[in-house]
Amino acid sequence: MKNMDHMDHSQPMQHGGSPFPDFWDIVSPGMLLLTVLLILLYLAIVGPWRNRWGSGEKVTIVKRCVFVSGLLIYYLATGPIGAFSHFLFSAHMTEMSLVYLIVPPLLLIGAPPSLLRRLWNIPRWKRILRILTHPLIALLTFNGLISIYHMPVVFDTIMGSMWLMQLSHIILMICAFMMWWPLVCPLPEEDRLSPLQKMGYIFADGVLLTPACAFLAFSGTLLYESFPGGPMTTAIMPPLEDQALGGIVMKITQELAYGSVLGYTFFGWVRKQRQQDENELATRRQQQREEINKKEGSTVSFNH
């Protein structure tokens, strides 16, 4: 659902002689309306319609806020930030970082499990989904396509065609959900990775994405003809700095996203281990008390 209101990168916009986007480009009314409608639909599905669409299980307020936040961030990325992404490479990378590294986990965490389970359990569809969300396949596919996407010849070709831009966005969005699924799987029965495996997965994910970010941040030359440094770029910062900032933004966003999930996974694992230890200790104490009671009962019977 990428914003279709904007022109492609090969056609720099001019608004009354100004290189800056106008108010309506920034607000993006079509995208705003779609976001509001999706929020209302979601709240209806997890609210009054939940018995019709699922098992009737409640989605917590926290999860509702997480899902709505994901939709709002998507609007912010493809609407206001997207308006500037046609001029500033750093804005384009900010848009990509939010859309592929922040939005998918928020939507997965907040999605109603009963509805996801219905979609997942469609017989043939389930077989395909299990292959696509296999940790190794998901990890390599997403990071591999991100690296290919940022090759200059590929990037400039995509930016020169609106339909290629839309197609690449759809493919990368699907791959982003594939990549995040093993980490924040909303269906307990499909959660394949242990907490330790998830931590290893996050580490591998960070390593695989680093070359693309470093390629942008430390290149000494302008890589993309799609961003040659027009009046908007030069009015804010030199084009080479804009390109480097784009790589830095993606790396920082990646670290924040993966770091948050890593912390959540680690402390959740510690909490689970502590609970297991407490349960085992309580079980041992209960067994000891039962043995003591048996011995006392045997002693009383013997004396009688």
Image (spheres, rainbow, N blue to C red):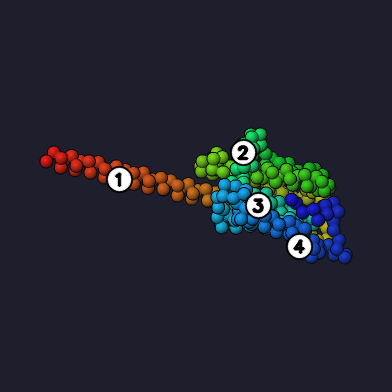
Circle 1 residue: 285
* Dot in front, 4 or 2: 2
Mark 3, Cα crowd under 10 Å, few <14 / some 14-19 / many 20+, is many
Tell me the element at label 4.
helix
Earlier sequence position, callout 3 versus callout 4: 4
Circle 2 residue: 121
The Cα atoms of the two marked residues, 3 and 2, are separated by: 24 Å
Earlier sequence position, callout 4 versus callout 1: 4
Earlier sequence position, callout 2 versus callout 1: 2
Left or right: 107, with 236 as reference point: left
Q: Amino acid at mark 3?
A: Val
* Dot in front, 2 or 1: 2
Circle 3 residue: 103
Q: Is residue 211 visible?
A: no
Mark 1, Cα crowd under 10 Å, few <14 / some 14-19 / many 20+, is few
Tell me the element at label 2.
loop
Residues at marks 2 and 1 touching, judged by CB atoms closer than 8 Å: no
The Cα atoms of the two marked residues, 3 and 1, are separated by: 47 Å
The Cα atoms of the two marked residues, 4 and 2, are separated by: 39 Å
Mark 4, Cα crowd under 10 Å, few <14 / some 14-19 / many 20+, is some
* Dot in front, 3 or 1: 1
Circle 4 residue: 27
Residue shown at 62%/40% (left/top)? 120
* Dot in front, 3 or 2: 2
Q: Amino acid at mark 1?
A: Arg
Earlier sequence position, callout 3 versus callout 1: 3
Earlier sequence position, callout 3 versus callout 2: 3
The Cα atoms of the two marked residues, 3 and 4, are separated by: 19 Å
Q: Nearer the viewer, residue 27 or 270?
A: 27
Q: Quadrant of residue 298?
A: top left
